[in-house]
Image (cartoon, grey):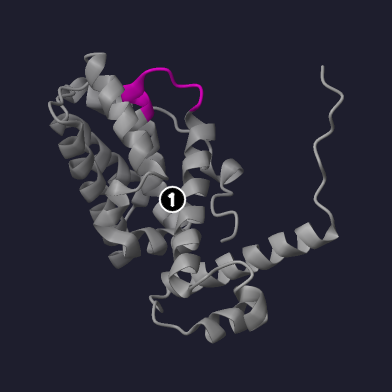
């Protein structure tokens, strides 16, 4: 084994990390609230950070907002990876992640509003759920689990349905989010050529406990 020790951030580096995290948290709050035109001064005040410190981390508000969105997507992707790492069947993994995402709309309301604010551009992102879903779709197709000719079209169908699900749950706060998420997942699986019996099984299996691993949004 190597005797090299992992370097520990010094006091200045830790302060930089805290400042960056505060800016990301503030930006995420503004995005979730739809305040995309807020001036930088207002964001730094919300983060309790000086204007000069802002430019030590980001060149513009647009750069900050992009980093804030990426932070949410990365955290959600990492959460889903942890919760589904034991699943080897790509169709089962896809269904599990999709059902979990449906439940996250209520468990993580701020992050969910950020996702909905991104809209369909979420589907072309190389972070978060989209690249993982496409990999599962391709793998499930190659394994004969899905009958999909074009993975990009399949991703567009699944992603559009997920965004619609999120908006529906936002508009109807009394709706059963778990049942609705499972129903949408079942419909998507059926569109991918999964039999009704198997789709039912995939959407009624026990899910990992989201509440125990719900730390998505490292700066949110």
Q: In this view, does 165 lie to the left or right of 93?
A: left
| Residue drawn at x 40%, y 63% as measured from the top left | 114
Q: Alpha-carbon neighbours of circle 1 within 10 Å: few (<14), some, or many (≥20)?
A: many
Q: In which quarter of the image is residue 182?
A: top left
Labels in figure, total: 1
Q: Provide the residue span drawn in magenta.
A: 85-93
| Residue drawn at x 37%, y 18% as measured from the top left | 89
Q: Which residue lies furthest to the right in this view?
A: 3
Residue 188 visible to an observer of this rendering: yes
Quadrant in which the N terminus is drawn: top right
Question: Front-most of 108 and 150?
Answer: 150
Q: In this view, does 103 lie to the left or right of 52?
A: left
Residue 204 visible to an observer of this rendering: no
Question: Percent x, y for residue 4?
Answer: 84, 29
Q: Is residue 63 left or right of residue 171?
A: right
Which residue carries the number 1 mark? 104
């Amino acid at each position: 084994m190597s005797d090299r020790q992992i370097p520990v951030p010094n006091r200045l580096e830790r302060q930089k990390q805290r400042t960056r995290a505060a800016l990301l948290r503030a930006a995420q709050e503004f995005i979730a609230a739809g305040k995309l035109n807020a001036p930088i001064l207002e964001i730094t005040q919300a983060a309790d950070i000086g204007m000069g410190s802002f430019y030590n981390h980001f060149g513009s508000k647009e750069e900050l907002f992009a980093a804030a969105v990426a932070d949410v997507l990365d955290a959600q992707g990492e959460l889903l990876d942890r919760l589904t790492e034991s699943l080897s069947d790509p169709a089962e993994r896809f269904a599990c992640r999709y059902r979990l995402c449906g439940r996250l709309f209520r468990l993580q309301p701020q992050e969910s509003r950020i996702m909905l604010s991104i809209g369909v551009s979420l589907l072309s992102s190389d972070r978060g759920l989209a690249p993982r879903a496409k990999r599962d779709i391709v793998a499930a197709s190659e394994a004969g689990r899905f009958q999909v000719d074009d993975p990009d079209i399949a991703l567009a169908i699944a992603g559009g349905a997920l965004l619609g699900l999120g908006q529906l749950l936002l508009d109807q706060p009394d709706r059963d989010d778990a049942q609705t998420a499972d129903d949408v997942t079942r419909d998507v699986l059926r569109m991918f050529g999964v039999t009704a019996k198997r789709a039912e099984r995939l959407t009624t299996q026990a899910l990992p406990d989201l509440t125990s691993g719900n730390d998505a949004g490292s700066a949110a």
